């Protein structure tokens, strides 16, 4: 399972990025590939193990899951709203994911240092 989670994340991220770019070219299957890719990213983030169990890390993990679910929500917005509204959802998800990808390793390292010292 440890090797499967990063593989899900990488495949899902590539599918999501490629599909978002392909959607601009009006490829009709792009939203569906985007949803599958974002689901893989969400599954990888939900089931990724955390070595530290503190309040801050749990909060950041919840925010990370929220960002992943917003990413999944972007797929149906691409299908049902044929304008550029999906870009707002994608941007919010990307900002949340960026924030948690920076803060989560910092908090985990801080907790590990606190346990050692």
Image (cartoon, grey):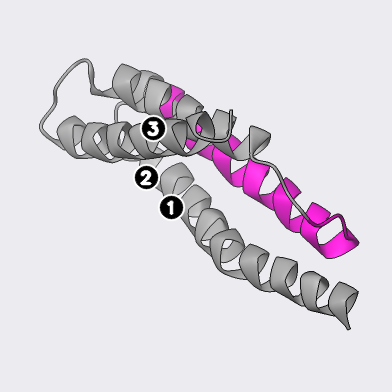
What residue sits right under mark 1 in the picture? 91
Residue depth check, mark 1 versus mark 3: number of the one nearer the observer: 3
Rounded to the nearest whole Å, what is the CA distance between mark 2 and mark 3?
18 Å
Tell me the magenta residue range.
52-76
Asked which quadrant contains residue 104, the reply is bottom right
* Residue name at image x 88 percent, y 73 percent: 115
Asked which quadrant contains residue 45, the reply is top right
Q: Position of residue 103 (x, y in %)?
A: 64, 69
Residue 74 appears in view: no
Task: Say which element carries label 3.
Answer: helix
* Image quarter of the C terminus: bottom right
Task: Say which element carries label 2.
Answer: helix
Task: Say which element carries label 1.
Answer: helix
Q: Earlier in the sequence, mark 2 or mark 3?
A: 3
Q: Are marks 2 and 3 in contact (CB under 8 Å)?
A: no
Q: Position of residue 90 (x, y in %)?
A: 43, 45
Rounded to the nearest whole Å, what is the CA distance between mark 1 and mark 3?
17 Å
Q: Position of residue 30 (x, y in %)?
A: 24, 23
Tell me, for residue 87, which label it has, or none.
2
| Residue that sits furthest to the left in the current view | 25
Q: Is residue 18 left or right of residue 33?
A: left
* Residue name at image x 50 percent, y 61 percent: 98
Q: Position of residue 53 (x, y in %)?
A: 86, 55
Above-or-below relation of 37 to 108 = above
Q: Are marks 1 and 2 in contact (CB under 8 Å)?
A: yes
What residue sits right under mark 3 in the picture? 12
* Residue name at image x 34 percent, y 32 percent: 11
């Amino acid at each position: 399972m440890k090797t499967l989670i990063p593989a899900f994340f990488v495949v899902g991220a590539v599918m999501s990025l490629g599909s978002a770019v392909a959607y601009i070219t009006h490829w009709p299957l792009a939203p569906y590939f985007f949803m599958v890719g974002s689901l893989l990213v969400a599954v990888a983030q939900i089931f990724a193990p955390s070595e530290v169990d503190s309040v801050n890390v749990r909060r950041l993990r919840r925010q990370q899951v929220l960002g992943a679910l917003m990413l999944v929500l972007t797929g149906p917005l691409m299908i049902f709203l044929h304008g550029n509204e999906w870009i707002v959802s994608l941007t919010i998800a990307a900002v949340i994911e960026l924030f948690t990808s920076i803060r989560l390793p910092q908090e985990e390292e801080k907790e590990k240092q606190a346990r050692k010292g």
